Amino acid sequence: MIDINLIREKPEIIKETLKKRNQNEKIKILEFLIEKDKKWKKLKQQSDKLRSERKKLNLQINSNKKQGKNIKKEIKQAGINRQKLLKTEEEKEKLEQEINKELNKIPNLLHKSVPTGKDESKNKVIKKYGKPKKVSFKLKSHGEIIESKEQGNFERATKISGAGFYFLHDKIAWLNQAIIRYAIDFLRKKGYNYVEPPLMMRRKPYEGVVELQDFQDVMYKIENEDMYLIATSEHPLIAQYINTNIKEEKLPIKLAGYSMCFRKEIGSHGVDTRGLFRTHQFNKVEQIIICQEKDSWKYFEELLKNTEQMFKELGIPYRLLEMCSGDLGNMKAKQIDLELWMPRQGKYQEVTSLSNCTDYQARKLKIKSIDKYLNKKVLHTLNNTAIATSRVLVGIIENFQQKDGTILIPKALHKYTGFKKI
């Protein structure tokens, strides 16, 4: 959530963000928050005054006791004061809950570089790398190649699990593992700590990392339990620090997390019945950084550089697409997607997504730094997919497919596969 002080001191900046995000209907929420916050401040002043009076009364009662004076009047007044304080605190707490509920609906402030636009049509291509190869033969789909070479099976997976699942066999399965190992080794050499997180999370910590109301249609809930299958390792990797004060000398925290991920993928695209690009279950290596505010945008660039370097080494053409204001999630201040060139499809397809959530997630989760003087500051959280293997497999099969149907393996993966082609 955003800092309540922005509501108090700079409401015009929030209003401008709402307009740029095409969320004008939330201006009423902003006005509601401004009004409720004024009432909260009055209640706090009353509460502080009553506490001060209680302290004076206690001192007076103790003094009169020592002097043998009658203290009935002071005790009666102390009782009245206590009841007033309890009532004021109750009203203040109830108002705080109302404020926090509505505050969660206000999106993060946009970075000044984010392009303004209503929808994805206004997303901006900011870079292209590599020249798409021209082929003189008709490319086969990755699903067709995988099944024809008995390197996987979609039909059998559908029989037992439904659409959106798959079996991988032999060299394709090994290539999948090679991609995972490659990404993990790459990030470990860069100083990222490797972590394998839980694959399920409870609702409360999950609400800190996503807008669960909007996201839960995509997620799998465990029946009759307060548990969700994770949609990405980003979520447990960040949520593990809920209600934590991290010593300044421990920052930044850099994590490389590998996990299976689970998503319903409900929407206009549906799921692949005979393919790997859009599935209910997939493997992903994620990059996470938790840092001080002053370092936030420096690490944004680092995360982008990491992913670019990996795909350059894999030798697959890509482009960078910056999300416009109307296509940006509420928690994000800025987002850049990396899209691979898919020659059979004749278009670029998203395979990684870089986001800076600034202090939005950390404030909601109460993740702070603490210095030697016990001063605390809300931290910043950043995430970027390193590699989602199923989509990279599609990219390799389409970009390294030969006329005779063989698939060449990118050189960077040879030491992990032990073979150079399929």
Image: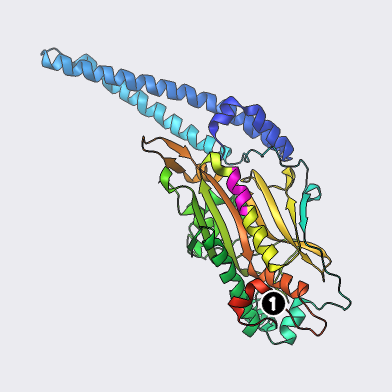
* Visible residue check, residue 44: yes
Name the residue at 51% across, 48% down: 290
87, 35: nearer the viewer:
35
The picture places residue 281, in percent across and down from the top left corner, at 61, 70
Total marks placed: 1
Name the residue at 70% across, 32% down: 16
Q: Is residue 30 magenta?
A: no
Residue with the mark numbered 1: 409
Position of residue 329 relative to residue 147, above or below, is above
Position of residue 111 relative to residue 39, above or below, is below
Horizontal side of residue 256 vs 171, given as left or right: left
Name the quadrant containing residue 272.
bottom right
Position of residue 80 relative to residue 388, above or below, is above
Give the extent of the magenta segment.
297-303
The picture places residue 335, in percent across and down from the top left corner, at 67, 49
Looking at the magenta stretch, what is its main secondary structure? helix
The picture places residue 376, in percent across and down from the top left corner, at 43, 37
Which type of secondary structure does the marked residue at label 1 adopt? loop
Name the residue at 36% across, 34% down: 373
- Identify which amino acid the numbered label 1 is placed on: Ile
Horizontal side of residue 205 vs 308, given as left or right: left
290, 265: nearer the viewer:
290
Horizontal side of residue 169 vs 394, given as left or right: left
Q: Quadrant of the C terminus?
A: bottom right
Badge 1 local density, few (<14 within 10 Å), some, or many (20+)? some
69, 156: nearer the viewer:
156
